[in-house]
Image (tube, rainbow, N blue to C red):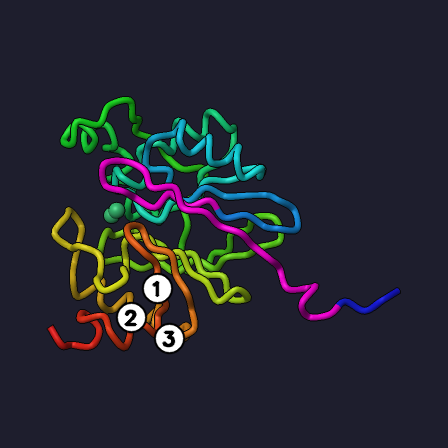
Amino acid sequence: MTQKTDAETKAKAGAIIVPVTLFEQNCTIIWCEVTRKAVVIDPGGDVPTIREAIAKTEVTVEKIWLTHGHIDHVGGAAELREALAVPIEGPHVADKFLLDNVVTSGARFGITGVRDFAPDRWLDEGDRVEIGELAFDILHCPGHSPGSVVYFNKEMRFAHVGDVLFNGSVGRTDLPGGNHDTLMRSIKDKLLPLGDDIGFICGHGAGSSFGQERMTNPFLTGKM
Ligand SMILES: [Zn+2]
Ligand SMILES: [Zn+2]
């Protein structure tokens, strides 16, 4: 029997981003390289495009994870769940009022064919979700929406932060249930302490790292 090296035991992952909806939302497919099992994070719409990306990537999607309840992140979730017969996990139950009103929210932007739905599992601070050999810790980060959650993988020094934090900005807080002070506390008390080296994918635009944002994001440097 040979001993496994650190490099071999370290779980490896792949990811692709599929921009969806008129909001150019970063639907993200993340997979475990060992098992080729994958999760689709925030299938906001354009489900045929997402399914094409899944087919091209040649992974087996076993779960759908949601960062929060806004239409551009959840609009395709119920349809994709039905098509793939996989469970939806997240967001935090505080976003239930959004998932109960997906149809109404969609109508405001001329988006049809969406459904109100409930996830198979609500997530809360300290929960752990898994795909293949990858494990993500859940951080409840309210402020952009009351039920926003962040998916954090400690080994890979990686987080999916949804609309909590952006490259050069932070989530908007003028929508129902939003609160800027609460959002800034989520970022400063929960995300930044994880370490400057944490790279992240966010709900819109290019990703970044917590260190990069701590040093240059005007909302965090106080220079705005
Ligand atoms: Zn949002
Ligand atoms: Zn968004």
Q: Magenta span has 19? A: yes
Of residue 100 and residue 10, the one placed in the foreground of this image is 10
Task: Report if residue 62 is visible in the image.
Answer: no
| Helix, strand or loop for disc 1 | strand
| Disc sitting over residue 213 in the figure | 2
Q: Are marks 2 and 3 in contact (CB under 8 Å)?
A: no
Question: Circle 1: is it few (<14), some (14-19), or many (20+) Cα within 10 Å?
Answer: some
As drawn, which residue projects farthest toward the right?
1
Task: Report if residue 70 is visible in the image.
Answer: yes
| Helix, strand or loop for disc 2 | helix
Q: Are marks 2 and 1 in contact (CB under 8 Å)?
A: yes
Q: Quadrant of the C terminus?
A: bottom left
Task: Decide which of tag 2 and tag 1 comes sooner along the chain.
Answer: 1
Task: Decide which of tag 2 and tag 3 comes sooner along the chain.
Answer: 3
C-alpha separation, residue under disc 2 versus residue under disc 1 = 7 Å
Residue 78 in the image, given as x and y percentages of width and height = 38, 29
| Disc sitting over residue 193 in the figure | 3
Q: Is residue 58 above or below residue 5?
A: above
Q: Amino acid at mark 2?
A: Glu
| Disc sitting over residue 208 in the figure | 1
Q: What residue lies at 59% left-to-right and 50% top-to-bottom?
A: 32
As drawn, which residue projects farthest toward the top?
113
Q: Is residue 93 above or below residue 208?
A: above
Q: Amino acid at mark 3?
A: Pro
| Helix, strand or loop for disc 3 | helix
Q: What residue lies at 34% left-to-right and 46% top-to-bottom?
A: 26
As drawn, which residue projects farthest toward the front?
56
